[in-house]
Image (cartoon, rainbow, N blue to C red):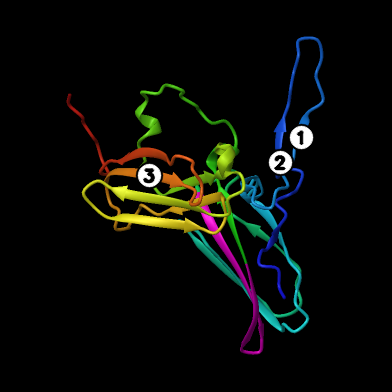
Amino acid sequence: MLNKSIIVRAALDLVCVILTVRTAAADVSPSIVVDSAQQSAHWSILFTNATPLMWTWPAEATHACLSITGMNSTFSTNFTNVTSNFLWQAFTSDVPGKEDVAELSLTFYNDCETVGTLNARLAILTGVFGDTAVNASADCSAWTKINDNAVVPYCAAYANVTTDVATAQLVIAKAGGMTQTNVFATADGYYGWILRNSDWRYGTFALSLAFPGTDADALTAELFRPLDGTLVRVR
């Protein structure tokens, strides 16, 4: 029986949260917080454009196909003999130009027969690379306006009553338009919301994140996507 996840080693020394504490007198050794929970979203984030992928090749397989599908690009390659790793270039530059969620699928074959498939989902977040400007003003429209495909994080750890749940539900409703309900098999992760060239188009969107089977209140947010070009608002 194949493990249902690709083991992704995004340089394990980087797949962690590194907190460096400095004092006026001397430097303090960095503290490394490693979250090894199976459902932790920390292990799903890319920290470099060169990402080593590793897996166990089943004995009955003669060849395999790796397919990677993101919101902004796709990639695929074939392995014609036993292979246990592959170095994937997630993007061409040192830092990603756009955020993305990539769906990885590695399918093993024996001649024309499928003998197993491994899957993984990885998030590319621009804030992980370099300096990111943060405007903490609650009235700043930058927090509520989106222009492109979006990465939506979800995590059950925000309340004690949700820490043991196994699934999450994200509802996206466009004012005066369509509604989409997304049910996730894990309680922590990232969802790639495709806005560009989709039926969502432009307008105001209400997002609601809930964890079925708990008493926790749903988390809500409202986002606005303007038409391409110059937008002028008059009060």
Distance of mark 1 from mark 2, alpha carbons? 7 Å
What amino acid type should be assigned to the residue bearing mark 3?
Answer: Leu
Which residue does the numbered mark 1 point to in the structure image? 32
Q: Horizontal placement of 95 versus 59: left or right?
A: left
Distance of mark 1 from mark 3, alpha carbons? 33 Å
Q: Secondary structure at mark 1?
A: strand
Instruction: Give the class, few, some or many, for how many residues have Cα within 10 Å of label 2's Cα (few <14, many ≥20).
Output: some
Magenta-colored stretch includes residue 167: no
Distance of mark 3 from mark 2, alpha carbons? 29 Å
* Residue 227 versus residue 72 in the image, above or below: above
Q: Nearer the viewer, residue 6 or 111?
A: 6
**Does the image show residue 54?**
yes
Q: Residue at x 44, y 45 (%)?
A: 209
| Mark 3 or mark 2: whose residue is earlier in sequence | 2
Give the magenta-colored segment's residue range.
100-118
Which residue does the numbered mark 3 point to in the structure image? 207
Residue lying at the far top in this picture: please name it. 25
Q: Nearer the viewer, residue 83 or 190?
A: 190
**Does the image show residue 98?**
no
Q: Secondary structure at mark 2?
A: loop
* Residue 200 versus residue 108 in the image, above or below: above
Q: Horizontal placement of 99 versus 227: left or right?
A: right
**Quarter of the image where one finds residue 178:** bottom left
Which residue does the numbered mark 2 point to in the structure image? 16
Q: Are marks 1 and 2 in contact (CB under 8 Å)?
A: yes
